[in-house]
Amino acid sequence: MKKSKVLFAMLAIIAVISLVAGCGSSEKTTQPTTASQEQAAGHEGHSAAMPKEDPMPMMKDLDKSLQDVVKQAKAGQTMDAQKSAAQLVSTVEKIVPHMMDANLKDSLRKAAGDIKNTVNAGKMDPSAIEGKVKTMQEIMKSTTSHLQTMQH
Ligand SMILES: [Cu+2]
Protein backbone atom coordinates (compact mmCIF):
# COMPACT_ATOMS: atom_id res chain seq x y z
CA MET A 1 0.00 0.00 0.00
CA LYS A 2 2.72 2.46 1.00
CA LYS A 3 4.71 1.72 -2.13
CA SER A 4 1.77 2.48 -4.39
CA LYS A 5 1.13 5.79 -2.55
CA VAL A 6 4.74 6.85 -3.10
CA LEU A 7 4.48 5.88 -6.75
CA PHE A 8 1.27 7.89 -7.09
CA ALA A 9 2.89 10.92 -5.48
CA MET A 10 5.83 10.69 -7.86
CA LEU A 11 3.53 10.45 -10.86
CA ALA A 12 1.65 13.51 -9.62
CA ILE A 13 4.89 15.47 -9.28
CA ILE A 14 5.98 14.48 -12.78
CA ALA A 15 2.60 15.56 -14.13
CA VAL A 16 2.91 18.98 -12.43
CA ILE A 17 6.47 19.46 -13.71
CA SER A 18 5.52 18.66 -17.30
CA LEU A 19 2.53 20.98 -17.04
CA VAL A 20 4.73 23.84 -15.85
CA ALA A 21 7.28 23.11 -18.58
CA GLY A 22 4.46 23.06 -21.12
CA CYS A 23 3.26 26.47 -19.99
CA GLY A 24 6.77 27.89 -20.24
CA SER A 25 7.25 26.72 -23.81
CA SER A 26 3.86 28.00 -24.94
CA GLU A 27 4.73 31.44 -23.54
CA LYS A 28 7.88 31.46 -25.63
CA THR A 29 5.99 30.69 -28.84
CA THR A 30 3.63 33.64 -28.33
CA GLN A 31 6.48 36.16 -28.48
CA PRO A 32 7.24 36.00 -32.24
CA THR A 33 3.51 36.38 -32.92
CA THR A 34 3.39 39.77 -31.20
CA ALA A 35 6.54 40.85 -33.06
CA SER A 36 5.00 40.05 -36.45
CA GLN A 37 1.76 41.75 -35.45
CA GLU A 38 3.73 44.92 -34.79
CA GLN A 39 5.36 44.64 -38.23
CA ALA A 40 1.95 44.16 -39.84
CA ALA A 41 0.66 47.28 -38.10
CA GLY A 42 3.66 49.24 -39.38
CA HIS A 43 3.02 47.97 -42.88
CA GLU A 44 -0.64 48.96 -42.76
CA GLY A 45 0.60 52.45 -42.07
CA HIS A 46 1.52 53.05 -45.71
CA SER A 47 -1.45 51.29 -47.33
CA ALA A 48 -4.20 49.16 -45.81
CA ALA A 49 -4.91 47.59 -49.21
CA MET A 50 -1.54 45.85 -49.37
CA PRO A 51 -0.91 42.28 -48.22
CA LYS A 52 0.70 42.05 -44.80
CA GLU A 53 4.09 40.83 -46.03
CA ASP A 54 7.51 42.32 -46.58
CA PRO A 55 8.18 42.45 -50.34
CA MET A 56 11.97 42.73 -49.93
CA PRO A 57 12.56 38.97 -49.46
CA MET A 58 10.38 38.49 -52.57
CA MET A 59 12.80 40.69 -54.54
CA LYS A 60 15.56 38.27 -53.52
CA ASP A 61 13.41 35.33 -54.69
CA LEU A 62 12.86 37.15 -57.96
CA ASP A 63 16.58 37.66 -58.45
CA LYS A 64 17.21 34.00 -57.70
CA SER A 65 14.56 32.83 -60.20
CA LEU A 66 16.06 35.09 -62.85
CA GLN A 67 19.54 33.68 -62.26
CA ASP A 68 18.10 30.15 -62.40
CA VAL A 69 16.44 30.88 -65.76
CA VAL A 70 19.74 32.16 -67.22
CA LYS A 71 21.75 29.25 -65.84
CA GLN A 72 19.24 26.60 -66.95
CA ALA A 73 18.74 28.18 -70.37
CA LYS A 74 22.51 28.15 -70.93
CA ALA A 75 22.68 24.51 -69.84
CA GLY A 76 19.83 23.64 -72.21
CA GLN A 77 17.62 22.47 -69.32
CA THR A 78 14.35 23.48 -70.98
CA MET A 79 11.95 22.03 -68.39
CA ASP A 80 13.82 23.56 -65.45
CA ALA A 81 14.12 26.94 -67.18
CA GLN A 82 10.36 26.92 -67.86
CA LYS A 83 9.66 26.13 -64.19
CA SER A 84 11.95 28.96 -63.05
CA ALA A 85 10.30 31.35 -65.51
CA ALA A 86 6.87 30.42 -64.12
CA GLN A 87 8.25 31.05 -60.62
CA LEU A 88 9.55 34.41 -61.82
CA VAL A 89 6.08 35.45 -63.02
CA SER A 90 4.31 34.24 -59.85
CA THR A 91 6.77 36.13 -57.62
CA VAL A 92 6.14 39.29 -59.68
CA GLU A 93 2.40 38.88 -58.98
CA LYS A 94 3.15 38.80 -55.23
CA ILE A 95 5.28 41.96 -55.41
CA VAL A 96 2.97 44.04 -57.63
CA PRO A 97 0.31 44.67 -54.91
CA HIS A 98 3.02 46.48 -52.88
CA MET A 99 3.87 48.87 -55.72
CA MET A 100 2.23 52.26 -56.08
CA ASP A 101 3.63 53.16 -59.52
CA ALA A 102 1.36 51.88 -62.32
CA ASN A 103 3.97 52.24 -65.07
CA LEU A 104 6.57 50.36 -63.07
CA LYS A 105 4.04 47.61 -62.34
CA ASP A 106 3.35 47.21 -66.07
CA SER A 107 7.05 47.20 -66.93
CA LEU A 108 7.83 44.56 -64.31
CA ARG A 109 4.96 42.32 -65.45
CA LYS A 110 5.90 42.75 -69.10
CA ALA A 111 9.61 42.01 -68.52
CA ALA A 112 8.85 38.81 -66.59
CA GLY A 113 6.21 37.78 -69.14
CA ASP A 114 8.66 38.32 -72.02
CA ILE A 115 11.18 36.00 -70.39
CA LYS A 116 8.53 33.37 -69.70
CA ASN A 117 7.22 33.50 -73.29
CA THR A 118 10.72 33.25 -74.74
CA VAL A 119 11.63 30.25 -72.61
CA ASN A 120 8.25 28.59 -73.22
CA ALA A 121 8.70 29.06 -76.97
CA GLY A 122 11.82 26.91 -76.65
CA LYS A 123 14.22 29.73 -77.54
CA MET A 124 16.94 28.52 -75.26
CA ASP A 125 20.02 30.14 -76.79
CA PRO A 126 21.51 32.75 -74.43
CA SER A 127 21.34 35.50 -77.07
CA ALA A 128 17.54 35.15 -77.24
CA ILE A 129 17.02 35.94 -73.56
CA GLU A 130 20.11 38.05 -72.80
CA GLY A 131 18.51 41.40 -73.65
CA LYS A 132 15.28 40.50 -71.85
CA VAL A 133 17.21 39.52 -68.74
CA LYS A 134 19.06 42.86 -68.76
CA THR A 135 15.77 44.73 -69.09
CA MET A 136 14.32 42.71 -66.20
CA GLN A 137 17.36 43.51 -64.04
CA GLU A 138 17.00 47.25 -64.71
CA ILE A 139 13.30 47.18 -63.78
CA MET A 140 14.06 45.15 -60.66
CA LYS A 141 16.54 47.84 -59.56
CA SER A 142 13.86 50.52 -59.99
CA THR A 143 11.33 48.34 -58.16
CA THR A 144 13.68 47.81 -55.21
CA SER A 145 14.30 51.55 -54.81
CA HIS A 146 10.57 52.21 -55.26
CA LEU A 147 9.72 49.72 -52.49
CA GLN A 148 12.39 51.23 -50.24
CA THR A 149 10.57 54.58 -50.31
CA MET A 150 7.78 52.90 -48.32
CA GLN A 151 7.74 51.48 -44.83
CA HIS A 152 7.50 47.70 -44.74
CU1 LIG B 1 3.44 47.01 -49.10
Image (cartoon, rainbow, N blue to C red):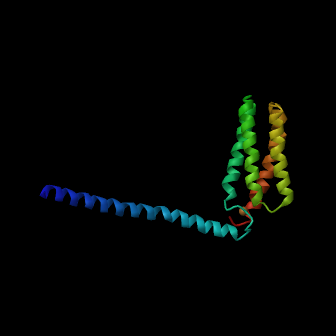
Q: Position of residue 149 (x, y in %)?
A: 74, 65
* Residue at (44, 62) in percent of width and height: 26
Location of residue 145 by image quarter: bottom right
Residue at 75% x, 41% y is 86
Tell which of 27 and 77 is nearer to you: 27
**Farthest right residue?**
103
Outermost residue toward the bottom in this view: 45
Q: Quadrant of residue 151?
A: bottom right
- Determine whether, in the image, residue 152 is placed left or right of residue 37: right
Residue at the front extreme of this rendering: 1
Place of residue 100 in the rendered image (x, y in percent of width and height, measured from the top left): 80, 63
The quadrant of the image that shows the N terminus is bottom left
Residue reaching furthest to the left: 2
Ligand 1, what quadrant?
bottom right
Image side of residue 65 versus residue 37, left or right: right
Q: Residue at x 68, y 48 (%)?
A: 61
Q: Position of residue 117 (x, y in %)?
A: 83, 38
Q: Is residue 71 above or below residue 63?
A: above
